Amino acid sequence: WGRSLSWMEGGAWAFCGPGSLVHSLPSSPSSAPTNERTYTAHQPSTSNSPPPDSLELTPLHALGFIVMASSALLVLFFLKIYSFVKIMYAFGCSGALTQVFFFPIYTKLFTSTKYKRYMSQVCINTPLCEIGAVSRIEVLSAMSGYALGLAWLILAFTLRHPENNVFFWVVQDIMGACMCILFLSIIKLNSIRVASILLIVAFLYDIFFVFVTPLIFKGQSVMITVATSGGPPKADPSWCEKYPTDADCQGGDPLPMLLTVPRIADYQQGASLLGLGDIVLPGLLLSFAARFDEAKKLVGFMRTGSATPTNRSPHTCPPD
């Protein structure tokens, strides 16, 4: 739950940062017309540095995670600005929807139609956030992403228990998945040491804010209180079923940084929940392991001409 708060600022990153829609899209070659953008595959980099639309984590970033996550959690606990979290989450996920969901779909649709050239033409050129030239297909993708995010946000503020609405939780799951994909495509680990530090400090962070903070804040768990938007209802569930508008029946709605699937055919209702932080942090380790495996295959191919990696030490002399 609370781990997801440490990257809520990803909303602004997704829109204006190095991993934004416009920055990560391939730009037009110099031979193309100035009012048209072409969409081709990224060319491999000739340098050893990571691409500009990615960020490699260091041990300092791992320690900074604790500071940022703890600060965000305590601010929400004391100020109770849960509505602000929903707005920021909708804004960030709308940018992720634009890049991960709508842009690939529209590109695929218009590629095989006569409107391909028209949709690839530049219609906006602005220096805002270093966006530069924007094509019609990018504008259409952004309009679709932010319109869906706005619809989700309206339901979040108008429905008493929006998580029971099918449209709401389906869109929330899609937005959460897009945000995880965008995050893992931008943030990368460069060593197993950084992964170990990050997962260990996240483990200690969870233990402290779930089990230790009740000893400090008169029985209130900071993590659970924030995750449930102020804590569960004080009244008895049977009372709240009869009088849902009662003041003691308010609260308990989970913050949106999670994937949720309502329990079907359960008389107690409820839902199965999975926080995005529980996806992203292990995902960083898995993506590092996958890139490491591919690097071993590449090194083996360069040495032996075969993609099968070799276990022989690089300092061992080859047999005569």
Image (cartoon, rainbow, N blue to C red):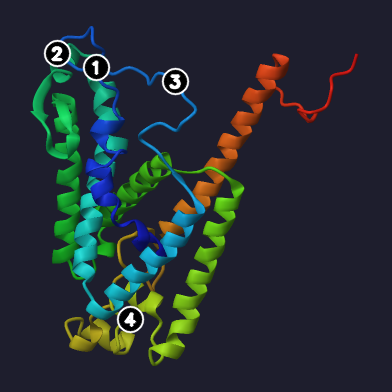
Q: Are marks 2 and 3 in contact (CB under 8 Å)?
A: no
Q: Residues within 10 Å of mark 1 (few under 14, many from 20)?
A: some
Q: Is residue 48 left or right of residue 42?
A: right
Q: Nearer the viewer, mark 4 or mark 1?
A: 1
User: Residue 167 placed where, x, y %?
Assistant: 24, 53
Q: Are marks 3 and 4 in contact (CB under 8 Å)?
A: no
Q: Which residue is mark 4?
A: 232
Name the residue rendered at 25%, 56% in the picture: 89
Q: Residues within 10 Å of mark 3 (few under 14, many from 20)?
A: few
Q: Secondary structure at mark 2?
A: loop
Amino acid of disc 2: Thr
Name the residue rendered at 69%, 14% in the picture: 305
Q: Which mark is residue 34?
A: 2
Name the residue rendered at 25%, 50% in the picture: 11
User: Residue 313 placed where, x, y %?
Assistant: 79, 30
Q: Nearer the viewer, mark 3 or mark 4?
A: 3
Q: Are marks 1 and 2 in contact (CB under 8 Å)?
A: yes
